[in-house]
């Protein structure tokens, strides 16, 4: 894991500097969240770095600000303040360059049901400017690895949830990016499909890829992550190697201890 990454190869590929993002709440949202506040601070002064070749985990409960953070890194939404740099490119001033360098998989990605995996792979390959021969070879490898080849010409409407997630995953990396963001990649998957996905994440790491992994699943963090940032109420309350975080207790107990301290205002 992380202790095998030496100082010599710890090249910073992501630098997040004081990212903040707020959203206005509608009356319906106020009622749902049982609050009189008209503005919710989703991310509050977030700062951290990630290094080439590591899997960095963002761990937190639903609504903690994980997805908002990743959407900012993917340039899908702009921060109110702060900035982040991916391989030296600003998410604010160099958005197009950032989008060309990253892969982004989110459970919120909705692909049109009348398209087929084959069409979507070709479409996104062309969008990213991938050479046709390279694209076809990459499609053959990825479709075979994830068992998509048998369903390449089947409309998404007729595919299972797990197969749709596999299609979304391979589409997110058609351009073979070195920096990949996965937001809850195993959500809604059966155990077999989830294992295929987690095994692939480890394979990507072995290729030197950097992965930012957002999840609320403790076992996934323990299996995959080199370092972990714990987000609660939009704030980073802990950041360390998995080894250090679990030195005295498992990651689940460590998380809930931090959660209780946050609730008491001790952090």
Image (spheres, rainbow, N blue to C red):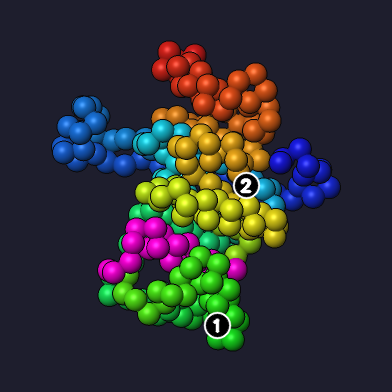
Question: Left or right: 116 with respect to 175?
Answer: left
Q: Position of residue 219 (x, y in %)?
A: 53, 36
Mark 1 or mark 2, which has the lower sequence index?
2
Q: Tell me if mark 2 has few (under 14), some (14-19) or many (20+) residues whose alpha carbon lies within 10 angstroms of its own.
A: many
Residue range corresponding to the magenta coloring: 157-176
- Tell me: 129 left or right of 232: right
Q: Is residue 111 left or right of residue 205?
A: left
**Position of 171 relative to 249 (above/below):** below
The reply to whether discs 1 and 2 touch (Cβ–Cβ < 8 Å) is: no
Q: Nearer the viewer, residue 194 or 110?
A: 194
Q: Nearer the viewer, residue 71 or 188?
A: 188
Q: Residue at x 63, y 52 (%)?
A: 202
Q: Nearer the viewer, residue 177 or 140?
A: 140
Residue 172 at what x, y percent from top left?
A: 49, 64
- Judge the density around disc 1: few (<14), some (14-19), many (≥20) Cα neighbours within 10 Å: some
Residue 136 included in the magenta stretch of the image: no
> Which dot marks residue 55?
2
Q: Residue at x 69, y 52 (%)?
A: 53
Q: Which residue is mark 1?
A: 136
Is residue 162 a member of the stretch shown in magenta?
yes
Q: CA distance from mark 1 to mark 2?
A: 28 Å
* Label 2: which secondary element: strand
Q: Name above or below for residue 99 compared with residue 51.
A: below
Q: Quadrant of residue 120?
A: bottom left
Secondary structure, mark 1, is helix
| Residue 203 position within the rendered picture, expressed as x and y whole percent measured from the top left | 64, 57
């Amino acid at each position: 894991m992380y202790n095998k990454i030496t100082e010599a190869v710890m090249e910073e590929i992501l630098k997040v500097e004081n990212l903040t993002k707020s959203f206005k709440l509608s009356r319906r949202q106020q009622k749902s969240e049982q609050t009189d506040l008209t503005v919710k601070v989703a991310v509050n002064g977030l700062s951290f770095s990630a290094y080439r070749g590591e899997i960095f985990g963002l761990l937190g409960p639903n609504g903690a600000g994980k997805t908002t953070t990743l959407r900012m890194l993917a340039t899908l939404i702009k921060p109110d303040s702060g900035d982040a740099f991916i391989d030296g490119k600003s998410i604010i001033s160099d958005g197009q360059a950032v989008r060309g360098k990253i892969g982004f998989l989110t459970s919120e990605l909705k692909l049109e049901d009348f398209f087929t995996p084959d069409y979507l792979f070709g479409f996104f390959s062309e969008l990213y400017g991938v050479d046709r021969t390279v694209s076809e070879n990459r499609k053959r490898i990825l479709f075979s690895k994830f068992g998509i080849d048998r369903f390449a010409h089947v409309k998404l409407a007729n595919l299972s949830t797990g197969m749709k997630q596999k299609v979304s995953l391979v589409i997110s990396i058609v351009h073979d990016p070195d920096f990949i963001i996965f937001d809850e990649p195993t959500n809604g998957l059966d155990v077999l499909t989830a294992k295929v996905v987690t095994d692939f994440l480890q394979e990507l790491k072995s290729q030197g890829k950097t992965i930012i992994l957002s999840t609320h699943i403790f076992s996934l963090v323990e299996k995959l992550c080199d370092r972990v940032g714990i987000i609660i109420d939009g704030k980073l309350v802990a950041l360390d190697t998995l080894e250090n975080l679990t030195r005295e207790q498992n990651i689940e107990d460590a998380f809930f201890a931090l959660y209780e301290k946050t609730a008491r205002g001790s952090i």
